[in-house]
Amino acid sequence: METINERLLSWASILDDRTRGQAERTAAMPFIHPHVALMPDAHLGKGATVGSVIPTDGAIIPAAVGVDIGCGMMAVRTQFTAADLAGRNLAVLHGQISRTVPLSAGRYNTSVRDTAAPRVEELRATPGVVQADSVVGMWPLQLGSLGSGNHFIEVSLDEAERVWLFLHSGSRGVGNKLAARHIRVAQEQCRARGISLPDRDLAYVVEGDPEFDAYIEALRWAQRFALLNREEMMDRVVDEVSQFLSGHGPRGQGPRREVERAETVNCHHNYTEREEHYGREVWLSRKGAIAAWEGQWGLIPGSMGTASYVVVGKGSVPALRSSPHGAGRSHSRTAARKRFTRHDLDARMAGIAWGHSNAFLDEHPDAYKDIDQVMADAADLVEVRHTLRQVVNVKGD
């Protein structure tokens, strides 16, 4: 851990000057208490650094939560092992998952499925739904859709050759629209108060104002949407895996082999909660970080073709009981497309059933930090319980 200054601590051994400068500007905001914690995967973000933990007293910076409110991970360990997958064409399973979960930006369900209906009803009864309806009226069709970029669905094997189902997504278009609205409101509020900001995306809403209350309502609704979205997708993936391993499809009919959920973890990594740190209740925003209270389970994925980790928190007080959320980008998407080739990506994904598309060049493993280094930097923050390797990788273009 490096003390950059009294208001900024860093666990990132790989940290470029622009990212450091951005984090310093955030840490200098007057309502930070006690300090910003930079995670090992920290990299440049919009307004606030991705991979930062930002405790605020009396205010919240909407852009410090980000535009994918509630984005996070879900994983299920099944009773199946590598032996159950042996000899089967995993490209078939890739295709099944790709058909049951809408992939890519702007692609959603055509109707609300039976599994999604009770989740939609829960969200309709949750404060914040009026705001959601006002920005995206068809949000129920977004529940159970993946998105694009670094969002994924994977089938993986752990160190004991057990099969895990693993996915990454958030609050989709409705969360994005809600976030964008409240970022604009924060900017308008700061302008109206004559507040000079080092970055317009550090604009904030002040506790006690109606704008603050409206943001908290929208935030909590979107965070719940994101968690239920992951649950809905996981239900579909579980069903497809059951069908695949039952021999339904090209291999003919067989007795159905239901997936048993031996372990389940579902965690946000772009969100805000009310928490106590250093003896004071604060609004704790994790932008690209997961909660790592002592004994708390979490998920830290690598990039395409690399390892992912199931972890348990160590409750590090200086790190604000947090840990990294993934590998963290080392090259922008534009730079990655110029730097890496499809031939190299094919080689890196050998042995994995994946989408075989140039659309994923910006997700090349080397566009991200070395996940092994990130995990080494996080040794005081989490304990690794399971190490996963991908055998199926589903992404939206």
Image (cartoon, rainbow, N blue to C red):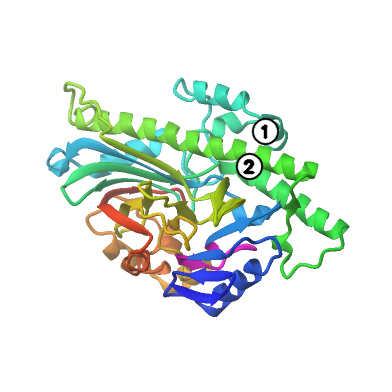
User: Which amino acid, mark 2?
Assistant: Leu
Q: Is residue 346 above or below residue 69?
A: below
Is 210 placed left or right of 140 in the picture?
Answer: right
Residue under the point 42% across and 61% down: 363
Range of magenta residues: 39-51
Q: Is residue 205 above or below residue 347?
A: above
Is 365 included in the stretch rendered in magenta? no
Residue that extends furthest to the front in the rendered view of this protein: 279
Please name the residue that numbered disc 1 is placed on. Answer: 128
Residue 61 seen from this side? yes
Please name the residue that numbered disc 2 is placed on. Answer: 219
Residue under the point 31% across and 66% down: 372
Q: Tell me the distance, in whole angstroms, between the alpha carbons under discs 1 and 2.
A: 8 Å
Residue 144 seen from this side? no
Is 98 placed left or right of 16 in the picture?
Answer: left
In this rendered view, identify the residue nearer to me: 83 or 357: 83
Where residue 397 appears, as percent x and y from the top left, is 47, 51
Residue under the point 79% across and 45% down: 209
Q: Are marks 1 and 2 in contact (CB under 8 Å)?
A: yes
